Image: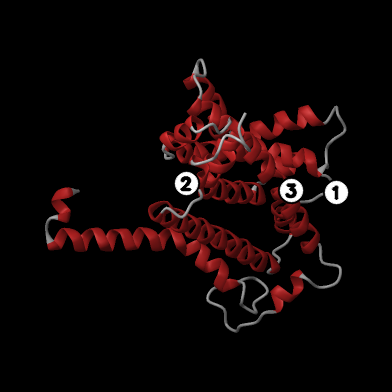
């Protein structure tokens, strides 16, 4: 690889190869977005004519898409809260404490990412069915948390490892208690990572299918399950429109993460994060 970069022909080859690979990966997404604006009822590509009719169908009277979209947003929001609570707790324990068997605990936390989702979904079904919680948004959100929390833990662990512990030690040496150190030092510095963890947890829950399929009911159908139900018996062009909406949400989320990381890095470099006032806290107000 280094030899290729050292020559002009090698750099051209790497550029062309990378461009071809990226275009191949992006091609299905581009096809979906372009097809969603086509007038053909069978989703032909390229479209013979253009229309916004399929997007209007999504929010027409009697459409099931708005209910499925709002339910997925609700469940994803609950999953984000649960994942952040578990992620912050687990990441702090794994990074900042002398936890016994740390490697084993870390492997257990990441296990849901390795186990097939259909297996996890079946286990959750057997767990919630006796409790009569099938179809409950809380149950679906808890199930999604099983998949989203490991991602949050990984992001928050990397964030905590990047925070200089000497800042926390300096605040503690000036008399700040643990709660004050966490509130004035750790959390502001970890905020970009927390936002990134929240965004990825939301996306993971919003797009999850297997757990939603096992735990949903007739009255609680998430967006991925609704897409599956529509395509199971018929070809509905409105699916391409809702798919384009999902792609737009994912792209906006990734742009948000990139912006937060850029702003967070700039603030750390310029000293804009509120760390200095916390280090100089007097012992009279917020001390133990």
Between the C-alphas of marks 3 and 2, the distance is 38 Å
What secondary structure is marked by label 3?
helix
Image spot of residue 236 (x, y percent):
71, 66
Residue under numbered circle 1: 218
Picture quarter with the C terminus? top right
| Residue in the foreground of this view, choosing between 155 and 129 | 155
Instruction: Please state which of residues 82 and 38 is positioned toward the viewer in this rendering.
Output: 82
Residue found at the far front of this picture: 284
> In percent of the image, x 54 and y 40: which residue is there?
281
Select label 2 or label 1 by which is in front: 2
| Foreground of the two, 204 or 81 | 81
Per the model, the C-alpha gap separating discs 3 and 1 is 16 Å
Q: Is residue 111 visible?
A: no
Q: Quadrant of residue 247?
A: bottom right
Task: Confirm or deny contact between disc 3 and disc 1 (CB under 8 A).
Answer: no
User: Is there CB contact under 8 Å for labels 3 and 2?
Assistant: no
- Residue plotted at (60% across, 84% down): 49
Distance of mark 2 from mark 1, alpha carbons? Answer: 54 Å
* Residue located beneath label 3 in the image: 75
278 or 55: nearer the viewer:
278
- Element class at badge 2: helix
Judging by the rendered image, the residue that carries numbered circle 2 is 276
């Amino acid at each position: 690889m280094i030899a290729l970069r050292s020559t002009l022909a090698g750099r051209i080859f790497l550029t062309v190869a990378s461009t071809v690979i990226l275009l191949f990966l992006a091609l299905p997404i581009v096809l979906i977005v372009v097809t969603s604006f086509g007038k053909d009822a069978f989703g032909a590509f390229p479209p013979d004519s253009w229309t916004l009719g399929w997007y209007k169908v999504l929010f027409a009277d009697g459409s099931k898409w708005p209910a499925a979209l709002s339910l997925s947003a609700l469940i994803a929001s609950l999953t984000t809260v649960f994942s952040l609570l578990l992620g912050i707790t687990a990441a702090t324990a794994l990074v900042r404490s002398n936890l016994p068997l740390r490697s084993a605990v870390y492997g257990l936390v990441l296990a849901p990412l390795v186990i097939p989702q259909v297996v996890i979904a079946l286990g959750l079904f057997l767990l919630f069915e006796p409790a009569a919680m099938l179809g409950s948004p809380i149950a679906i959100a808890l199930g999604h948390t099983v998949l989203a929390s490991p991602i949050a833990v990984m992001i928050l662990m990397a964030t905590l490892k990047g925070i200089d512990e000497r800042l926390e030690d300096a605040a503690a040496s000036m008399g700040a208690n643990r709660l004050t150190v966490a509130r004035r030092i750790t959390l502001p510095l970890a905020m970009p990572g927390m936002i990134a963890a929240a965004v990825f947890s939301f996306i993971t829950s919003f797009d999850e299918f297997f757990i939603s399929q096992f735990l949903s009911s007739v009255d609680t159908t998430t967006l991925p399950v609704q897409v599956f139900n529509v395509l199971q018996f018929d070809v509905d062009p409105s699916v391409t429109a809702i798919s384009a909406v999902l792609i737009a949400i994912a792209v906006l989320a990734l742009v948000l993460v990139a912006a937060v990381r850029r702003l967070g890095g700039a603030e750390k470099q310029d000293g804009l994060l509120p760390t200095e006032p916390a280090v100089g806290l007097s012992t009279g107000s917020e001390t133990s």
